Image (cartoon, rainbow, N blue to C red):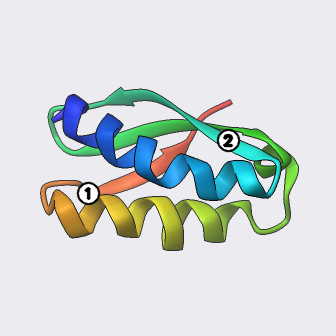
Amino acid sequence: MKEKVNEIIQKIRPQLQMDGGDVELVDVSDDGIVKVRLQGHCRGCAYSQMTLKLGIERALKQVIPEIQYVESVP
């Protein structure tokens, strides 16, 4: 599952980079919890939770329904 998640993150990454941000995949647990690290402008942005839930999490769940949720780690 981690490989699939990484493939999808690679597809979304250019959109984040256009705004000066980025995302790094940290871990994918067996129970479907994805941990990412927001970087650049995304890290301190007031809209980072929207990016996380409506952008990254939504994109992952569309392709991999086993994903429970995505969380940001420091």
Where is residue 13? Give x, y as percent.
Answer: 55, 47
Is 15 above or below relative to 29? below
Residue in front for this viewpoint, 26 or 17: 17
Where is residue 35? Give x, y as percent.
Answer: 45, 37
Q: Residue at x 21, y 45 (%)?
A: 32
Element under disc 2: strand
Residue in front for this viewpoint, 74 or 47: 47
Label 1 sits on what residue type? Gln
Q: Which residue is mark 2?
A: 22
Is 34 above or below relative to 60? above
Where is residue 67? Give x, y as percent.
Answer: 22, 54
Q: Which numbered disc, 2 or 1, marks the residue closer to the eye?
A: 2
Label 2 sits on what residue type? Asp
Q: Which residue is mark 1?
A: 68
Where is residue 27? Give x, y as percent.
Answer: 37, 27
Q: Residue at x 14, y 63 (%)?
A: 65
Q: Residue at x 51, y 37 (%)?
A: 36
Is the C terminus in the top left, top right, bottom left or bottom right quadrant?
Answer: top right
